[in-house]
């Protein structure tokens, strides 16, 4: 048996498995097993009214977890799954209150990572229907984008039978775009790598307006926070950490944490840079936010929350 098949068996028998996805690493449990899901909340120290995303192997599995799926949601699934997009749909009876936080909707995603997809397929061969997985960080902290980050974040809180799968650095680096599909038109609840413009180009679907001040998912404003204080668009002083595009020079005695050349690289490097700040014991991190739409909007959303 491969390590991924062993992990599928562990999930089926009620253990936790942290696994890589293209966005961030998730902390997975069988989405039909209330005791296993309860362990996620206890490891993360997460309030139990926060719903979890159910990860599935393909679009067909969505029909088990959701009912009355609108045509536009199927279009989105065809265009962007597997990929960094979560659809919020009306739940079926499979999606119990312990997954949805008591809401009548369920979040579904097919992740685009070979290890995650093999895990989900092996899990379904064992009769599983979906893997509930929040980001594998403690509640309110920075999401992990590597197996080492998962280790240092939560391994001391896992049991011996729980597993962490290795899958390299997450290529997207920030959490999926969450799209509410319960209205007449789709609406972005959490911005991510898949933007409204991209959706328009690929599917001709226009979003209900949500603007930049999205509050829904994660509900709390303070999120994605390192121990260091994060300050946006300020002057970096000696001893500060700096996250900014490569075009911006590093002032003397400032510790450069990331120097991305594109917005995609910025997203990819952001959480590792915030973790590095904490490892180095840096007190204050200055981030110069990228301008514009697309993934830049999602980066500003995360940085705003990290700074509040
Ligand atoms: O990229 C991602 O989405 C990662 C990877 C592991 O897939 N997962 C992730 O999960 O970011 P988490 O739990 O850290 O964030 C999921 C967010 C939460 O803020 C939750 O409130 C929201 O999705 N959510 C889940 N189900 C929902 C629902 N039915 N309605 C509204 N929001 C929901
Ligand atoms: Mg999270």
Image (cartoon, helix red, strand yellow):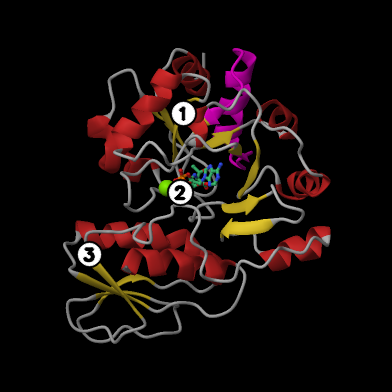
Q: Which residues are magenta?
A: 107-131
In the image, residue 80 lies at what x, y percent? 71, 49
* Residue 228 disc label: 3
Tag 2: Cα neighbours inside 10 Å, few (<14), some, or many (≥20)?
many
Q: Is mark 1 within 8 Å of ligand 1?
A: no
User: Of tags 3 and 2, which is closer to the observer?
Assistant: 3
User: Of tags 3 and 1, which is closer to the observer?
Assistant: 1
Tag 1: Cα neighbours inside 10 Å, few (<14), some, or many (≥20)?
many
User: Of tags 2 and 1, which is closer to the observer?
Assistant: 1
* Residue 169 disc label: 2
* Residue 263 disc label: none
* Residue 98 disc label: 1
Q: Secondary structure at mark 3?
A: loop
* Residue drawn at (37%, 31%) of the image: 40
Whether residue 237 is visible to the viewer of this picture, yes or no, is yes
In the image, residue 107 lies at what x, y percent? 59, 40
Whether residues under marks 2 and 1 lie with C-beta atoms below 8 angstroms apart, the answer is no
Q: Nearer the viewer, residue 228 or 47?
A: 47
Q: Secondary structure at mark 1?
A: helix
In the image, residue 54 lies at what x, y percent? 56, 34
Based on the picture, tell me whether residue 116 belongs to the magenta stretch.
yes
Whether residue 222 is situated above or below residue 12 in the rendered picture: below
* Residue drawn at (44%, 20%) of the image: 34
Q: Left or right: 129 with respect to 278? A: right
Q: Left or right: 1 with respect to 280? A: right
Whether residue 15 is visible to the viewer of this picture, yes or no, is no
Q: Earlier in the sequence, mark 3 or mark 1?
A: 1
The picture quadrant where one finds residue 124 is top right
């Amino acid at each position: 048996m491969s390590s991924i098949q062993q992990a599928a068996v562990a999930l089926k028998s009620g253990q936790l498995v942290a696994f890589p996805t293209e966005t961030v690493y998730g902390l997975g449990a069988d989405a039909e097993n209330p005791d296993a899901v309860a362990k996620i909340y206890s490891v993360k120290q997460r309030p139990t009214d926060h719903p979890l995303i159910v990860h599935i192997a393909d679009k067909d599995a969505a029909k088990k977890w959701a009912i009355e799926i609108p045509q536009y949601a199927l279009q989105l699934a065809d265009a962007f799954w597997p990929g960094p997009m979560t659809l919020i749909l009306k739940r079926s009876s499979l999606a119990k209150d312990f997954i949805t936080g008591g809401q009548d909707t369920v979040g579904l995603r097919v992740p685009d990572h070979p290890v995650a997809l093999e895990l989900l397929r092996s899990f379904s061969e064992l009769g599983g229907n979906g893997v509930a997985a929040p980001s594998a960080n403690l509640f309110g902290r920075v999401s992990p984008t590597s197996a080492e980050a998962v280790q240092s974040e939560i391994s001391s809180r896992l049991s011996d039978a729980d597993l962490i799968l290795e899958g390299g650095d997450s290529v997207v680096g920030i959490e999926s775009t969450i799209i509410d599909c319960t209205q007449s038109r789709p609406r972005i609840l959490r911005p991510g790598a898949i933007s409204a413009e991209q959706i328009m180009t690929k599917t001709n679907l226009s979003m209900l307006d949500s603007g930049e001040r999205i509050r829904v998912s994660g509900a709390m404003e303070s999120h994605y926070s390192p121990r260091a204080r994060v300050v946006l668009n300020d002057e970096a002083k000696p001893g500060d950490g700096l996250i900014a595009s490569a075009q911006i020079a590093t002032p003397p005695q400032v510790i450069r944490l990331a120097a991305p050349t594109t917005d995609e690289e910025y997203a990819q490097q952001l959480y590792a840079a915030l973790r590095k700040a904490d490892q180095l014991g840096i007190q204050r991190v200055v981030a110069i936010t990228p301008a514009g739409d697309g993934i830049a909007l999602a980066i500003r959303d995360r940085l705003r929350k990290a700074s509040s």
